[in-house]
Image (cartoon, rainbow, N blue to C red):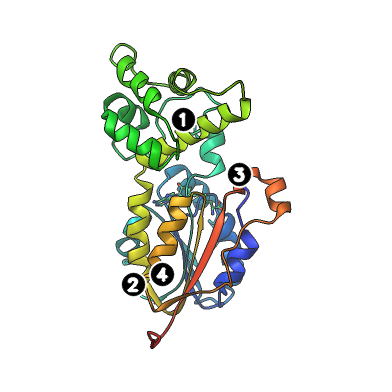
Amino acid sequence: MHRPVLLAETISSLAIAPTDCVIDATMGYGGHSQKIIEELIDPSGRLIGIDQDLTSIAHCQEKFKDTSNMTIVHGNFSNIDTLIQPLTSKPVNKIMADLGMSSVHLDTSKRGFSFQKSEPLDMRMNELNPHTAADLLNHGSAEKLLKILKEYGELNRPDRFVEIIISTRKAHPYLITDDLIVAIKKGFYFRNSRSLYMRTCAQVFQAIRMAVNNEVGVLTSFLEKSSELLAPEGRIAIITFHSIEDRIVKNHFASLPNFKMATKKVVKPNQTEVKHNSRCRSAKLRTYIKMTDEPTA
Ligand SMILES: C[S@@+](CC[C@H](N)C(=O)[O-])C[C@H]1O[C@@H](n2cnc3c(N)ncnc32)[C@H](O)[C@@H]1O
């Protein structure tokens, strides 16, 4: 089951007016979109939901089939400007993104996002994209794999693991998640610690997923385009799950003098939410307001 993360906090920080034009750039299973629609009670209020995953698109088309003021579009949020251009001439007042994969990707997609399931090593959020996790593992250079594991997986010493992949992949190509697990077990030391083993698996899988979906590159492009697109007084809320993403969001808005934070500090899930949804424990919400005039120094 998918539980929307920081739901009340995100909706309240966006301060949605009934007539707003809102973009949910990561519609997923429609948890945040549902709440946004409930705020748009004026017939002129409008929600555009974007997702790059066709399963999510099909799910939301059914879920929101009777919602007249919502449009759903398949695509990558890095193209937010061109995706919404044919859909609305209204200024965009609010934008939100809840980054990464959904619980549905982990639980039922059968695309290799979970290290606890035996599935093909795919990991593409958009199945129309050409390159899978198996392609990366079977053809990526040692330098590229090391960089991905250090930067996105925050793994200190992935060298032995990468050597194992490079030396075994010709005879035994990496095709399913079990193949990767075998290499993880050989390539890292766990000192008999189950939690260290689980954490390492999660870090390796996360790093490969981030690389397969170019998650850092598309986030940068999304932030640049969204900042332009947003009308004055508009707000943008981003939920991140990784320190790299959070840093990118923070630095991006710090470099724009006409944006200020809408909340006193970064918003994190409370203990009750973490208790009910352990996957949200690393979530951070940053919401920014686009000011009408650039402040004078
Ligand atoms: C954490 S889930 C969002 C869940 C959603 N807020 C909800 O409550 O159901 C992230 C979703 O964003 C989508 N996604 C991730 N990166 C994307 C991108 N670059 N462009 C469009 N969709 C993206 C994923 O396919 C996934 O469905």
Asked whether mark 2 and ligand 1 are closer than 8 Å, the reply comes as: no
Identified at 46% across, 24% down, the residue is 177
The image shows residue 20 at horizontal and vertical percentages of 50, 76
User: SS class of the residue under badge 1?
Assistant: loop
Location of residue 269 in the rendering, given as x and y in whole percent from the top left corner: 64, 56
At label 1, the amino acid type is Gly
Look at 33% across and 72% down and name the residue there: 228
Residue 117 visible in the current orientation: yes
Q: CA distance from mark 1 to mark 2?
A: 36 Å
SS for tag 3? helix
State how far apart marks 2 and 4 are (Cα): 15 Å
Depicted 157 relative to depicted 84: above or below? above
Whole-Å distance between the Cαs marked 1 and 3?
17 Å
Tag shown at residue 112: 1
Tell me the quarter of the picture where residue 155 sits: top left
Ranked by sequence position, the earlier of labels 2 and 4 is 2
**Where residue 142 sits: x, y (%)?**
28, 28
Residue 228 numbered tag: 2
Q: Earlier in the sequence, mark 1 or mark 3?
A: 1
Q: How many marks?
A: 4
Q: Residue at x 42, y 38 (%)?
A: 207
Write down the residue under mark 4.
Answer: 254
Badge 4: residue crowd in 10 Å (few <14, some 14–19, many ≥20):
few
Residue that badge 3 annotates: 279
Query: Relative to 232, does residue 131 appear above or below in the rendering?
Result: above
Q: Which residue sits at x=40%, y=29%?
A: 158
For mark 4, give the secondary structure.
helix
| Residue 79: numbered disc | none
Q: Nearer the viewer, mark 4 or mark 3?
A: 4
**Alpha carbon distance from label 4 to label 3:** 28 Å
Question: Around disc 2, counting alpha carbons within 10 Å, would you say few (fewer than 14), some (14 to 19), or many (20 or more)?
Answer: few
Looking at the image, can residue 124 be seen?
A: no
